[in-house]
Image: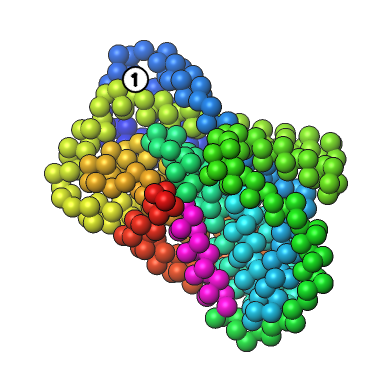
Amino acid sequence: MMILLILAVVLALMLRQRIVAILGFVAGFSYLVWGDGNLTYVVLDIWAAADQEILLSIPLFILAGNIMSRGTIAERLIAVMRVATAPVPGGLAIATILSCAVFAAISGSSTVTLIAVGSIMYPALIKAGYSRKFAMGSLCAAGTLGIIVPPSIPLILYGVMTETSIADLFKAGIGPAIMLTLIISLYALYINRSILRQRFDLTALRTALKRGIFSLFMPVLILGGIYGGLFTVTESAAVAVFYATLVELFIHRELNFAKLEDVVIETATMIGSLMPLLMMAMSINIFMTYEQIPHALVDIISAMITDQTSFLLLSMIGLLIVGCFVDIGSAILILAPLLAPLAIAQGVDLIHFGIVMIVNLELGYLTPPFGLNLIVAMGVFGEDFWIIAKSVLPFLALMFVVLLIVTFWPALSLYFVRI
């Protein structure tokens, strides 16, 4: 029966069926065949999964990101970065990457970051003389910072599915995010070193800071509040929505109540497709825990994998392959509950493994055939899918180097957790 279920799931994935329907089928099939045949447990599991306060942070962070992308918070952040990096050769490229890093820290989403920053910076990079290949590749790669820079929605999903501290996961994402941002920035500086630097303009910097002060304060408010113990992750998401709405409606005055209503409806539609997926995945997780499937899997695989390095290497290869075909949210919901017990059995810290898993799947945003950032970039840049895919190859190589460092140097992830 297990082989039949696996074949059915693989066939459904090949036919591009909706993940939520596949998970619903797996949950129902599992209870009917291996459980006591009572499908009402699926409903009870869904209710138990939904009754978690931390899940409120997901729609709230998405709503905050959508409000900011519709307003001018992104544009004002970018203006500050452009003026600040003007004296550096290739400064506009570095400004692009730093803008993605800062905006990711307040949106928590890769696609929102790519759309918000890419729609502004792509035309600016082309106009300034940067190659289209570099402009597209750098924006697609830097856009992925949205899933590793805290607050990150994939990190929240991982924390929920593995019962790991989300605040600690956010802290663990800081080191890898800084390293990834630094390496991409250095590459941008090297590639564009021939582009003339501009004169530093103190007046322009003052003007940009004055216009962008409320935008720059947002990541300080959100992350400072979480790490300072002022509020929880869920409360910080609510603060992000309140602050973004307040700034865009009454200070920047770029949104009105009619536009805000459209943003809320748009976000609700997006959440309507995400939350059922999460509920079904958690139902399967509850069933597997009850039937002690993870423990049995640990016993089987532990007999084949005898050391931590082998486990990390095999996990890395498997996650890279999965990331090419499955979106990061679905991959986390399905694989995190299975891999977490294996990580514990091999002595891998669950917080470190969470970052390893996210960075692995992050590369999937840039790999054919279903790389989400590549698909979104087609609309942002108006270019063919395979042209965009070729443009990200150098950045994929850099990100793979960072992946190896993150995987085999746990201190990079755990430093900010332990201080």
Q: Secondary structure at mark 1?
A: helix
Label 1 neighbour load within 10 Å: few <14, some 14-19, many 20+? some
Q: Residue drawn at (31%, 28%), measured in percent from left and top?
A: 288
Q: Quadrant of residue 13?
A: top left
Amino acid on which disc 1 is placed:
Tyr
Residue 143: x and y in percent read 58, 58
Residue 373 in sight in this render: yes
Residue 191: x and y in percent read 56, 80
| Front one among 383 and 122 | 122
Residue 144: x and y in percent read 54, 56
| Front one among 371 and 203 | 203
The answer to whether 117 appears left or right of 345 in the picture is right
Identify the residue under disc 1.
31
Q: Quadrant of residue 130?
A: bottom right
Q: Is residue 179 magenta?
A: yes
Residue 120: x and y in percent read 73, 62
Q: Residue drawn at (59%, 59%), measured in percent from left and top?
A: 101
Magenta stretch bounds? 173-189
| Front one among 127 and 206 | 206
In terms of secondary structure, what is the magenta stretch mainly?
A: helix
Name above or below for residue 273 compared with residue 363.
above
The answer to whether 236 appears left or right of 180 in the picture is right
Q: Residue drawn at (38%, 45%), measured in percent from left and top?
A: 351
The answer to whether 72 appears left or right of 392 in the picture is right
The answer to whether 34 appears left or right of 226 in the picture is left
Residue 324 in sight in this render: no
Quarter that holds the N terminus:
top left
Q: Residue drawn at (60%, 53%), measured in percent from left and top?
A: 104
